[in-house]
Amino acid sequence: MSADHHRMANAIRALAMDAVEQAKSGHPGMPMGMADVATVLFSRFLKFDPADPKWPDRDRFVLSAGHGSMLIYALLYLLGYERMTIDEIRRFRQLGSLTPGHPENFVTPGVETTTGPLGQGLGNAVGMAIAERHLAAEFGDIVDHRTYVIASDGDLMEGISQEAIALAGHLKLNRLIVLFDDNGISIDGPLSLADSVDQVKRFEAAGWAASRVDGHDPDAIAAAIEKAQTSDRPTLIACRTTIAFGAPTKAGSEKSHGSPLGAEEIAGARQKLGWTSAPFEIPPDILAAWRGAGARSKPAHAAWQKRLASFEATKRAEFERRMRGDLPGEKLRAAVRAVKESLASAPKEIATRAASELALETLIPALPEMLGGSADLTGSNNTKTMSMKVLTAADYGGRFIHYGIREHGMAAAMNGMALHGGIIPYSGTFLVFSDYCRPSIRLAALMGERVIHVMTHDSIGLGEDGPTHQPVEQLAALRAIPNLLVFRPCDTVETIECWQLALEARQSPSVLALTRQNLPQLRLGRDDDNRCARGAYEIAAAEGRAQVSLFASGSEVVIALAARKLLADKGVAARVVSVPCFELFFAAPDDYRESIIGTAPVRVGIEAAVRQGWDAIIGSDGLFVGMSDFGASAPYKDLYRHFGITPEKVAETALSGLR
Ligand SMILES: Cc1ncc(C[n+]2csc(CCOP(=O)(O)OP(=O)(O)O)c2C)c(N)n1
Ligand SMILES: [Mg+2]
């Protein structure tokens, strides 16, 4: 290998040391340890064009070990990503810089995903690799790239990694290549404190090709990547490295993981590495070599543009639409209209999970970007329509993924698909297991990615499976995540409306909380406008001046309507507001919100879940009928009676407020 390699890698090391030192915080060890691997990958293999960070056919690079963010920032600067200037490197970890503590894809061009919570990036990468194969099945050689990951010990120790690698191995995602920073060190010290897994054997057991290399030997690294590129399965390359390679006393020690090395140590490292440049200075010949590496894929990019230009016009337009993330607006509106019309002519008393399937029967043919799935609850989540083929290693063109019992891995993969572009992933599990998806849902919300989680069995209404399966705090917990839309439709009509809103929410993930139990259709469905769009609306007005406002979501709306009748019998006028989505309601114009909250002296919230969050609608002096403890195992009607979520109880509660 040329002397250039070592000096190029040292440029990464120097920038990492200097930026962390300047910020007085950060993680120099990982970038210094993985500088050789990254140099080989970016200067010889990775396909990308700094002039067009969003080139659809670029290789995806995921820095799963997000604490090593200076590695990617140094690379982006050295390779010539225009906005990543040396000033941005100097401003590492400062407010408003392009160089936040951990990589954020919505901040920094060239960063593919937001990482830091260990294991998530690897999970995203599996989704990206699925997206690539799926789109290639549809669009041919316009889609032809690889996904590379740098993962650390922490990434591989996290449980989510098992789900991710098992799924990738099963689907034979041979364009997925993981470079494992096998440095034997984590924060507490040597890995031997807490781990003795043989990662090569582990990955092999999951259907991967796996090997070990010296992570400071560029030729060995290159040979391993070359081999991986022709593998018939995903590849793990365990790169044996020394953390903080080059640091005189802290190399190989956990002390270099997450703190500045200090002036003396940096001076020693400069000497050891033969790096004589001042802080933040890169010798012109080295910068030129890096910029040359940045220009390496220009011919490939040009060839791709030519291929795209010669692509059949409608297919090309469709590909471009999909990658932009634009919906086929008219088709979506027509699909929603068709569903509503059929519901208007033949109202249905079905569970909202079944209503969701009904909606999907029309949405799936209309929106080819939708890619569904379930974590082994396909029949319960109703996420697979009759016509959907399964995505398998033999047929990546299928549009339904059997994720297996892997909620963590599923949710992370969905984020990766959305990030890849061209796909709107949706999937299913039970609402109570949203906790198993939560870390990925949170990241989807932070990143502003459109992923849709169908979460059924949304309350004690699921009945006999009992409290382990009955969500009570999950709705509140999900509503606490900023930028997440939590929908809880009350009938078939609201369900299609909520689906439409979730699909249209370009920069927000959504959860659709759906029932297991049947519900009557409360709305005729003839409305042209989407009544759920403002989050809450009056579904039944008071007869006369309202003394009571009843606010409910999902399966409790019908209970509120029955309570309204009981109150009317007692001469008390009540109105009912359906609240399918808190977040949209809170975002609605003030005057709309005020009119929906209304002026009735008594406000009652009804939801088969904990009260937390409802005060924003009913006020702290509002009354609430719901759950304050875990559920129980019994037929669901018995449970509603047992926990006092009934029309009688609601009416009684309202009356107590009037007294
Ligand atoms: C889910 C999660 N838990 C904990 C952390 C805090 N953390 C950051 S890095 C790290 C482990 C460091 O070891 P390793 O992954 O091997 O990285 P290295 O020190 O080798 O760079 C931990 C526990 C995290 N980022 N994410
Ligand atoms: Mg480590």
Image (cartoon, rainbow, N blue to C red):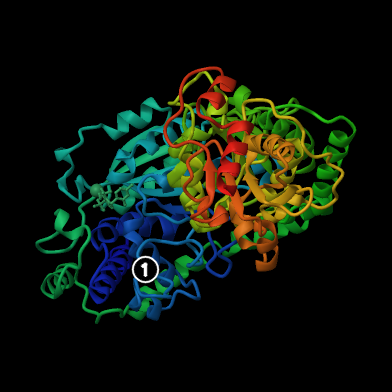
Amino acid type of the residue tagged 1 in the rendering: Ala
The residue lying furthest to the front in this view is 659
Q: Is residue 229 visible?
A: no
- Residue 495 occupies which quadrant of the picture? top right
Q: Is residue 224 visible?
A: yes
Q: Give the crowd class for mark 1: few <14, some 14-19, many >=20 residues within 10 Å.
A: many
The residue lying furthest to the right in this view is 345
Q: Position of residue 267 (x, y in %)?
A: 14, 74
Q: Position of residue 215 (x, y in %)?
A: 27, 49
- Residue 78 occupies which quadrant of the picture? bottom left
Disc 1, SS = helix
Residue in front for this viewpoint, 369 or 73: 369
Side of 592 where 27 appears, left or right = left
Residue in front for this viewpoint, 645 or 246: 645
Residue at left offset 45%, top offset 62% = 104
Q: Is residue 617 above or below residue 160?
A: below
State the quadrant of the N terminus. Answer: bottom left
Q: Position of residue 319 (x, y in %)?
A: 73, 52
- Residue 586 occupies which quadrant of the picture? bottom right
Side of 240 where 166 appears, left or right = right
Side of 191 where 442 appears, left or right = right
**Residue tagged by mark 1?**
74
Residue in front for this viewpoint, 94 or 505: 505
Side of 250 where 348 appears, left or right = right
